[in-house]
C-alpha cells in the first residue's frame, strides 16, 4: 500500500484520547460467549451473510465500505458511522508500540464496532510487508527482491506463516501484502517490493499467501497493486503503464491470477494508470477481468486516498466516488476525509448514480471475508500469539532467508569464502553497522530510517559472530586505518532507506560519493576488497567492478544480518540468482533480459562445475489424497540439483513447491481437472511434464486414489 505523505503525528492525540475513553482490554483473547451473534446460527455461510445484509440500513452498508486511518478516527466514531475497517499507515502506531499496545488499541476499535446495533466487527489493515514491520520487536524478513533471488516458494510460504503469527500476536487481522507487482524498470522506488522482473517469479512466490491465510494464525492477505504498477514508463511511481492489452496480460496479470487461484482475500488497486486511464476508474480491468474473468470473490480495496486523484484536483468529489465504486471498488481507503467521503457515497446511492446492487455486492464481499476469517465469532485480539513476535524460531527463519537470497556476482581467485582463522579482516562502509539501512523502507516507519531502529543483528555483528575468535575483525565506517596487514577488506555499501515516491531515481542509479571514496581508499591498501551491496535494486557498479575481488548482492536483508556472514565465511554456499537483469548503466533501463552486466538468473557459487544444460527427469505420475497432490521426486543428471516443481492445472500454472506435495484446494463437482507437474533445476532447465492425473469430482468430498481417473467421493 502506498500511504501517501502521511500526516499522522498531530492526529495521534485524537486516537490516544479515544483509547482513554474506551479503556484498554488487558488479557482478553476473545469476546465473551454471551455476546449476541450478528450472524444467524448454523446453516450455509452465504445464506447467513444474506440474512445479515437484509437487516442492514443504508448507513450500515456504506459504513462497511469505508476504511479510516487510526489517527483520524475514534472508536466512538466507528460506532456512530458503522465503519467497516480501520488501518495504520506506515509509522502510525499506538503510543505503546508493543504487541500488547497494539492489541489494546485494536480491541478499543473493535469494541466500538461491537457497540453498533448489528455488532459487525471491523477489519484492521496494516502494511506487514516484510514481517510485522510496524510493531517494534518484530522479525524483519528480507524484502521481496531478496526472496525473489531465492526462488524458494516453500520458504516464502513459511515466512507468510511466521508473519501471520506475529501480526496475530499484535491483535491484527489484515495485511496489505504481498506485492506481486512485476518491476520492469529499476529506477522505480518500489522495485524492492517486487519479487523480480519476470512474472514467473512473482507467480511462484504467491505461495506466501498460503502461509498468511492458511496457517495456525490466519490473517487476510492482499495482492497488490492491480494492475501494472511495476511497468510505468520511466519507472515513475503512480505513472502510466503504456502497453497493449496483450502485453499487460502477459507480463502483469499472471501473478494476480495465481493469487486469486490461491484464494487471496483482498486485491489492492494501483495508483497507476493504464494507457492514460487511472486504475481506480478502470471498470473493465477491475470488474470484467478481475472479478469476472479471474473469478475473484474477495474484497477490492483502494490505495491511500487514491479516489481523490481521479479528476486530478485535490479534494473528493461525488463524481470521483461514484466512478471508483461503479468501477468495482468494494472498500475505500479514505485515511482522513472519510466523513466527507461517506456523505458523497450516500448521495451517490440516493441519487441512483451508484446502483444499490453495487453497494450490496461490495458489502456482501466484505461481510463474507469477515465471516471466513472468524471475526464474528472471535472479534477481539488473540493474545496467545504475542510470544511469537520476534522469537528465536522466526529469527532463525529470517536468517535462512537472508543467506538463501545472497547472490555472488564476482569471486576472483576464489577470495570467498573467507577463512575463519588467521590474520585480520577490515570491515567498512555505511551499511556495515546500521540495522536501519539493511532493513530498508517500510520498517517501523513508511520511508524507514538509518540507525538503531529495530532489534536484530547488523551485518558487522554477524561477521564478528561467524568469524569467531580465530580472526581479528576491525571496523571503521570510513575505512580509516586500513593497510596491507589485513588479509581482506569487506565494504558494506549501497542504498539508505526509502519507499515509493522518495525512492524513484530517474537521474540514475550510481553509487553515492561516500561509497566511491571508500572503495578507492580500500583499493589503495592493495588487499582483496569484498563488496557487499545492500540495496533494493541493481546499482551502477561497472566502473568500480575492476577494483572488487568479490561482489555480493545482499539486497535488503532485514533484521538478521548474520545470514550475510554465513555466506561470506562459507558456512553456506551462495545459491541466490538474480531476479532482475543487472544493467551496465542506468541508461539501459528498462533492460529486462537485455545485454546487461549480469544476466537475469546469474549467480555464482563456491564450487567449480561445468554448465548444467541437462533437464531433470520428469516427476512421477501425481496421485491424490483427500487434500493434497503428491508425486515422486525427479533426478537431475546435469548436477546443479533439482530446484523445485511447478504444478499445472488444465495447462495453467497454479503454484510451485520445493517439496513433493501441493494442496488440491477446492475442486468443483462435475468438473474434469488435469494435473501435471514439471521439475526445474537450479540452472533453469525444465523437465518434460509428468503423466497427467485426471480428477473428476461428481459429488462434494475428498479425493481417493484409484487406477485411472481419481474420483472424489
Image: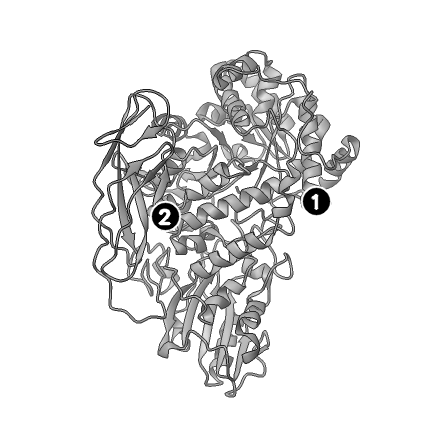
Q: Position of residue 639 (x, y in %)?
A: 26, 62
Distance in Å between CA atoms under marks 1 and 2: 47 Å
Callout 1 crowding tier (Cα within 10 Å): few <14, some 14–19, many ≥20: few
Q: Is residue 517 left or right of residue 582?
A: right
Residue named by callout 2 = 659
Per the image, label 1 sits on a secondary structure element best described as loop
Colour setting:
one colour
**Residue 3 showing in the rendered view:** no
Q: Is 319 drawn above or below residue 26 in the view shown?
A: above
Residue 549 position, x and y percent, is: 41, 77
Horizontal and vertical percent for residue 21?
Answer: 79, 31
Q: Position of residue 372 (x, y in %)?
A: 51, 27
Disc number at residue 321? none
For the residue pair 631 and 126, the one nearer the viewer reads as 631
Residue at 54% across, 45% down: 163
Classify mark 2: residues with Cα within 10 Å, few (<14), some (14-19) or many (20+). some
| Residue pointed to by mark 1 | 9
Residue 450, quarter of picture = bottom right
Q: Is 247 left, or right, of 472 in this rendering? A: left
Name the quarter where the C terminus is drawn: top left
Comparing 672 with 261, the one in front is 672
Amino acid at each position: 500500500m502506498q500511504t501517501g505523505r502521511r500526516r499522522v503525528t498531530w492526529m495521534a492525540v485524537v486516537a490516544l484520547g479515544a483509547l482513554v475513553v474506551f479503556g484498554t482490554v488487558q488479557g482478553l483473547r476473545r469476546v465473551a460467549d454471551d455476546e449476541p451473534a450478528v450472524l444467524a446460527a448454523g446453516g450455509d455461510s452465504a445464506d447467513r451473510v444474506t440474512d445479515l445484509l437484509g437487516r442492514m440500513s443504508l448507513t450500515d452498508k456504506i459504513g462497511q465500505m469505508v476504511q479510516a486511518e487510526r489517527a483520524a478516527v475514534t472508536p466512538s466514531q466507528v460506532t456512530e458511522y458503522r465503519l467497516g475497517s480501520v488501518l495504520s499507515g506506515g509509522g502510525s502506531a499506538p503510543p505503546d508500540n508493543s504487541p500488547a499496545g497494539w492489541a489494546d488499541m485494536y480491541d478499543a476499535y473493535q469494541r466500538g464496532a461491537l457497540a453498533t446495533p448489528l455488532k459487525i466487527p471491523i477489519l484492521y489493515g496494516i502494511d506487514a510487508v516484510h514481517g510485522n514491520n510496524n510493531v517494534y520487536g518484530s522479525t524483519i524478513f528480507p524484502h521481496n527482491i531478496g526472496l525473489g533471488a531465492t526462488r524458494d516458494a516453500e520458504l516464502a510460504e513459511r515466512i507468510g506463516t511466521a508473519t501471520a503469527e506475529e501480526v496475530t500476536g499484535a491483535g491484527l487481522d489484515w495485511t496489505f501484502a504481498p506485492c506481486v507487482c512485476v518491476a520492469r524498470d529499476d529506477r522505480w522506488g518500489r522495485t524492492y517490493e517486487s519479487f523480480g522482473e519476470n512474472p514467473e517469479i512473482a507467480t511462484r512466490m504467491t505461495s506466501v499467501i498460503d502461509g498468511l491465510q492458511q496457517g495456525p494464525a490466519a490473517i487476510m492477505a492482499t495482492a497488490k497493486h492491480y494492475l501494472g504498477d511495476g511497468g510505468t514508463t520511466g519507472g515513475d511511481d503512480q505513472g502510466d503503464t503504456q502497453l497493449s492489452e496483450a502485453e499487460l496480460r502477459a507480463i502483469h496479470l499472471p501473478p494476480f491470477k495465481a493469487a486469486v487461484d490461491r484464494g487471496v482475500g483482498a486485491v489492492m488497486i494501483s495508483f497507476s494508470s493504464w494507457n492514460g486511464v487511472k486504475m481506480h476508474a478502470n471498470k473493465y480491468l477491475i470488474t470484467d477481468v478481475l472479478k469476472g474473468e479471474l473469478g475473484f470473490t474477495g474484497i477490492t480495496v483502494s490505495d491511500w486516498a487514491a479516489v481523490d486523484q481521479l479528476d486530478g484536483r485535490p479534494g473528493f468529489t461525488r463524481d470521483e466516488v461514484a466512478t471508483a465504486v461503479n468501477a468495482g471498488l468494494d472498500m475505500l481507503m479514505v485515511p482522513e476525509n472519510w466523513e466527507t467521503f461517506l456523505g458523497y457515497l450516500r448521495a451517490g446511492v440516493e441519487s441512483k448514480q451508484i446502483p444499490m446492487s453495487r453497494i450490496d455486492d461490495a458489502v456482501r464481499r466484505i461481510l463474507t471475508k469477515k465471516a471466513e476469517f472468524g471475526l464474528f465469532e472471535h472479534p477481539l485480539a488473540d493474545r496467545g500469539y504475542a510470544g511469537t513476535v520476534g522469537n528465536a524460531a522466526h529469527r532463525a527463519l529470517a536468517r535462512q532467508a537472508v543467506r538463501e537470497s545472497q547472490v555472488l556476482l564476482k569471486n576472483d581467485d576464489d577470495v570467498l569464502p573467507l577463512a575463519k582463522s588467521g590474520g585480520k579482516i577490515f570491515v567498512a562502509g555505511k551499511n556495515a553497522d546500521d540495522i536501519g539501512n539493511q532493513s530498508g523502507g517500510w520498517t517501523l516507519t513508511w520511508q524507514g530510517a538509518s540507525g538503531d531502529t529495530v532489534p536484530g543483528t547488523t551485518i558487522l555483528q554477524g561477521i564478528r559472530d561467524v568469524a569467531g575468535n580465530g580472526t581479528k575483525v576491525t571496523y571503521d565506517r570510513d575505512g580509516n586505518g586500513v593497510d596491507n596487514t589485513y588479509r581482506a577488506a569487506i565494504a558494506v555499501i549501497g542504498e539508505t532507506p526509502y519507499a515509493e515516491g522518495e525512492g524513484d531515481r530517474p537521474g540514475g542509479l550510481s553509487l553515492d560519493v561516500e561509497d566511491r571514496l571508500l572503495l578507492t581508499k580500500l583499493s589503495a591498501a592493495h588487499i582483496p576488497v569484498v563488496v557487499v551491496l545492500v540495496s533494493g535494486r541493481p546499482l551502477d557498479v561497472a566502473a568500480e567492478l575492476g577494483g572488487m575481488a568479490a561482489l555480493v548482492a545482499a539486497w535488503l536483508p532485514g533484521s538478521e544480518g548474520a545470514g550475510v556472514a554465513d555466506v561470506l565465511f562459507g558456512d553456506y554456499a551462495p545459491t541466490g540468482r538474480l531476479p532482475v537483469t543487472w544493467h551496465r548503466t542506468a541508461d539501459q533501463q528498462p533492460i529486462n533480459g537485455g545485454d546487461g552486466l549480469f544476466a537475469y538468473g546469474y549467480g555464482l557459487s563456491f564450487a567449480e562445475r561445468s554448465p548444467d544444460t541437462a533437464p531433470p527427469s520428469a516427476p512421477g505420475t501425481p496421485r491424490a489424497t483427500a487434500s493434497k497432490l503428491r508425486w515422486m521426486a525427479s533426478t537431475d543428471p546435469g548436477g546443479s540439483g533439482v530446484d523445485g516443481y511447478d504444478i499445472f492445472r488444465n495447462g495453467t500454472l497454479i503454484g510451485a513447491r520445493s517439496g513433493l506435495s501441493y494442496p488440491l484446494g477446492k475442486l468443483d463437482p462435475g468438473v474434469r481437472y488435469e494435473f501435471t507437474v514439471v521439475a526445474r533445476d537450479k540452472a533453469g532447465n525444465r523437465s518434460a511434464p509428468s503423466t497427467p492425473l485426471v480428477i473428476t469430482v461428481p459429488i462434494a468430498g475428498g479425493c481417493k486414489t484409484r487406477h485411472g481417473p481419481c474420483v472424489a467421493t
